[in-house]
Image (cartoon, grey):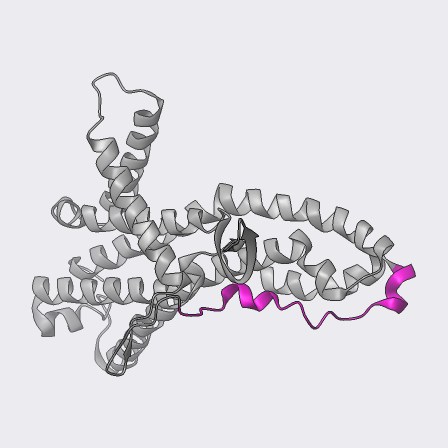
Amino acid sequence: MKARLLAALAPLVLLLTPASASALQVNENFKPQNEFKLDPWISIHIGGLDLSINKAVFYVILAAIFTCFTMVWIARRMQARPNRVQTAVEAAFTLMRDNITRGNMSDAMAKKWFPFVGALFLFIWFSNMLGYLPLPTNTEHTVNIFGAQIPSLSLYAATANLSVPLALTLVVWVSYHVEGVRAKGPVGYMKSWIPAGVEGAAAGPIFVIEVISHFVRLVSLSVRLFANILAGHLLILFMGGGLVVLLNLAVAGSVILGLVTGTMAIAFFLFEVGLVATLQAFIFATLTAIYLGGAVAESH
């Protein structure tokens, strides 16, 4: 849906600024895709393995630090009479423990896997929220401050890079298969993929479909998070002025379009921060709990 909205922006511009349509020229110097370009900050190569530090790695480390520091800091300041911060933390804890984890698996599994599911939810949430804070990470464009070239402010999220959601998805995918094999054995776990009551010739095609569905989960779980965060950042980038620069409109046209897109940029920003960032973390953690619970469930 977001992609279709981006594709519809060009004709919208022509409708809003008919007087300047004839003077419209594409600005070849403006390349918004470079916001997601990952140039190495510190090159680290071990054999054929590239372990260079870049913007995505920096945001992953930052999200991990925020996750660990926040939880440790809060845990050491819990009180018998909770303040507002503790009340919010307890509400989030209840959401992660009761709704996400216990709501999708047995109590024994929930006790075992709640730390993982909770940490996964918080890490993704912090990664998403950090993506909407302007940080000095744009090394392509620098600002001269007292003779020092400081990277300019930019928006970027680790989860807007497919490799990060895919790595998290692989951990989840391997984990729930291991749990299923532990609980039922290799043969029993494979048999559990066929729903109860399905017998005879129908069992073969159903089993093949189930095998495919497990591999499709690798795509659906990772791409859902990646695509939503990436599309949100692209919309904010274009609505926040990128479209005006890209189309290189005349002054009158840029002012009119800027008023419209600027308002839309604020609306998209509030929508992404207020709903999408948390919703995507919730969906990823919930599906993780569902997969873990389903792998050890007695019936399909």
- Does the image show residue 98? no
* Image quadrant in which you'd find residue 299: bottom left
- Does the image show residue 291? yes
The residue at 9%/61% (across/down) is: 183
Asked if the stretch drawn in magenta spans residue 30, the answer is yes
Q: Is residue 253 above or below residue 39?
A: above
| Number of marks drawn | 0
Q: Is residue 79 above or below residue 216?
A: above
Give the quadrant of the N terminus: bottom right
The residue at 35%/63% (across/down) is: 164
Q: Is residue 169 above or below residue 65?
A: below
Which residue reaches farthest right? 19
Specify start and end residues of the magenta stretch as a single range: 18-40
Horizontal and vertical percent position of residue 101: 24, 46
Horizontal and vertical percent position of residue 132: 49, 48
Q: Is residue 186 left or right of residue 81?
A: left
The residue at 65%/58% (across/down) is: 238
Q: Is residue 81 above or below residue 104?
A: above
Horizontal and vertical percent position of residue 144: 56, 54
Which residue reaches farthest top? 81
Q: Is residue 12 left or right of residue 105?
A: right
Horizontal and vertical percent position of residue 280: 42, 52
* Image quadrant in which you'd find residue 3: bottom right
In depth, the one of 240 and 8 nearer the eye is 240
Give the quadrant of the C terminus: bottom left
Asked if the stretch drawn in magenta spans residue 164, the answer is no
In depth, the one of 273 and 8 nearer the eye is 273
Q: Is residue 63 left or right of residue 200?
A: right
